[in-house]
Image (cartoon, rainbow, N blue to C red):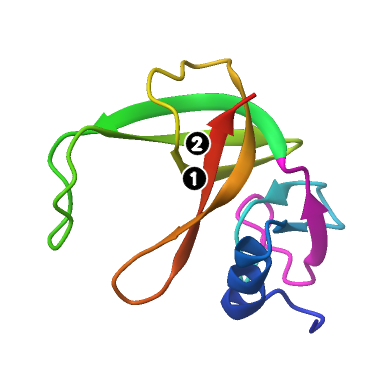
Amino acid sequence: MSDRLTHEEWSTAVREGELLGQSCPDCGAVQGTPKAACPHCGTVGLETVELPTEGTVYTETTINVPPINVEERGYQVAVVQLGDARVLGRLVDQDVDIGDTVAVSGYDEDDQGYPTPRFEAE
């Protein structure tokens, strides 16, 4: 792994059932996806950290009007609080609510092969 977390490294981890993020050594903020600099203080020397694979639903919504090339309707996505970071992903189980505990259960890929974590209720 490089000193700086790349999207490719992040994607590989997602495919392997792991989640990587970045921690700011100056302000302590933790991001759930690769960034060039800390969005809170601007520091560029972010450190790669492993994130928990279990967390709490921070917010959720149901997608009834999907993006182009997606036929499925009525699927649920959520922002999941994983330790100090938040990660967007798809929910496997329907009717998951804010505050519910979920865990990584795989991933989905878009039509360009980019992965996103999939979560299921615990």
The quadrant holding residue 11 is bottom right
Taking the image as shown, residue 62 lies to the left or right of residue 44, namely: left
* As drawn, 31 above or below 13: above
Taking the image as shown, residue 74 lies to the left or right of residue 54, namely: left
* As drawn, 100 above or below 64: above
x, y (%) of residue 84?
74, 37
Report if residue 35 is visible in the image. no
Report if residue 93 is visible in the image. yes
| Quadrant showing the N terminus | bottom right
| Most distant residue in the right direction | 25
Q: Is residue 2 magenta?
A: no
Closer to us: 96 or 85? 96
x, y (%) of residue 23?
79, 55
Residue type (three-letter) at the residue carrying disc 1:
Leu
Taking the image as shown, residue 113 lies to the left or right of residue 7, namely: left
Closer to us: 18 or 58? 18
Secondary structure found at label 2: strand
x, y (%) of residue 29?
74, 46
* As drawn, 7 above or below 30: below
- At 71% from the left edge and 35% from the top edge, which residue is drawn? 54
- At 68% from the left edge and 57% from the top edge, which residue is drawn? 17
- Magenta stretch, residue numbers: 38-53
C-beta proximity under 8 Å, tags 1 and 2: yes
What whole-number distance in Å separates the C-alpha atoms at marks 1 and 2? 4 Å
| Quadrant showing the C terminus | top right
Name the residue carrying label 1.
88
Within 10 Å of disc 1 (Cα), the crowding (few <14, some 14-19, many 20+) is many
The quadrant holding residue 10 is bottom right
Main SS, magenta residues: loop
* As drawn, 112 above or below 59: below
Name the residue carrying label 2.
79
